[in-house]
Amino acid sequence: MSLIDQYNRKIKYLRLSVTDRCDLRCFYCMPNGFDDYDEPKDWLSFDEIERIVTSFTRLGVSSVRLTGGEPLVRKNLPELAKRLAALPGLDDLSLSTNATRLARHAEELRDAGISRINVSLDTVDPVKFKKITQGKLEKIIDGLLTAKAVGLDPIKINMVVMKGVNDDDVEDMLKFCLENNFTLRFIETMPMGDTGRDAVDYYIDLHEIEARLEKSYELLPAVMAGAGPARYVQVAGTNLKIGFITPISQHFCDTCNRVRLSATGTLYMCLGDEHKYELRPLLRQGISDNDLDQVIRDAINLKPLKHEFNEKPEKVIRFMSKTGG
């Protein structure tokens, strides 16, 4: 079976948030003093998550990424990963994390069936890291090196490039990833929620970053396995691949293959649109499997043709941490 929206895009990828809580405070994601968290009783249980993901896999979704907030804040996450990894039709189970708790959990995540990880890291300068996240860089480095040691591969580093904040760290991040055999991915800032609209002041077109790197490195076209929208190049003479994720300067809406499920069971069809479908009440009212499949099909047809970050930056009012990274 296939899950196809009204614009004939096949949905193969579910980004699944397991919590809206995070142990860092990146200024472009979550404002200082924010405490409007969902109550744990409102989070989907592991049984409810498994049931929804089972429905998605019946409908043809083959890739699931566990996200947050910070997903490792959720207790017993490896148990959930193991349950999901065993589902028929699920070929790719991955994790996005800030790596603060990764050293503690890397081995059991690997054993549970996590095939690859993405780690948010915007700088390898400890002073800048503290300024951006209010956290300690050494915990992230420890988590990354532990993940590498236990054999998680590939490890992708996601860097949100911000003018006047960390744009001068691009070359240092490249060298760090080259030394450690990590993949480096640059991401443009998005005007999502109040924090995102503030962050638009730091926006940089990633084509500028690519042009800058080309002055020092030969960049060759490349491909890399994964369900996301990154365009890849490879640094000639090395194994380093660099991805560019450009939702603003060169959006990828025509080929968008993903939807997001929040920790409380809200299905979002697009980061740049407020259309949503509430699944948790239906689960707790006893919806049948057939009806759940049909609800998901109906929801997918709410997916817009494209986001409107450029035209209507004020449109989306929720925080990224509540939507799922």
Image (spheres, helix red, strand yellow):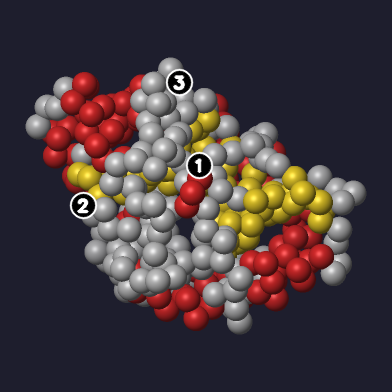
| Residue type, label 3 | Gly
The x, y position of residue 60, in whole percent, is: 41, 26
Q: Nearer the viewer, residue 297 or 119?
A: 297
Q: CA distance from mark 2 to mark 1?
A: 23 Å
Q: Is residue 289 left or right of residue 222?
A: left
The answer, for residue 114, to whether it is visible in the render is yes
Q: Distance between the Cα atoms at labels 2 and 3?
A: 32 Å
Question: What label sits on residue 39 in the rendered view?
Answer: 2
Frontmost residue, 255 versus 178 = 255
Q: Which image quarter holds the N terminus?
A: top left
Residue that badge 3 annotates: 89
Coordinates of residue 162 in the picture (x, y in percent): 58, 73
Q: Residue furthest top?
A: 88
Compared with 46, 132 (above or below) is below
Mark 2 vs mark 1: which is more N-terminal?
A: 2
Q: Residue at x 31, y 26 (%)?
A: 55
1 or 3: mark nearer the eye: 3
Whether residue 75 is situated above or below residue 206 in the rendered picture: above
Q: Is residue 233 above or below residue 198?
A: above
**Occupied quadrant, residue 27:** bottom left
Tell me which residue sits at (81%, 56%) in the image: 219
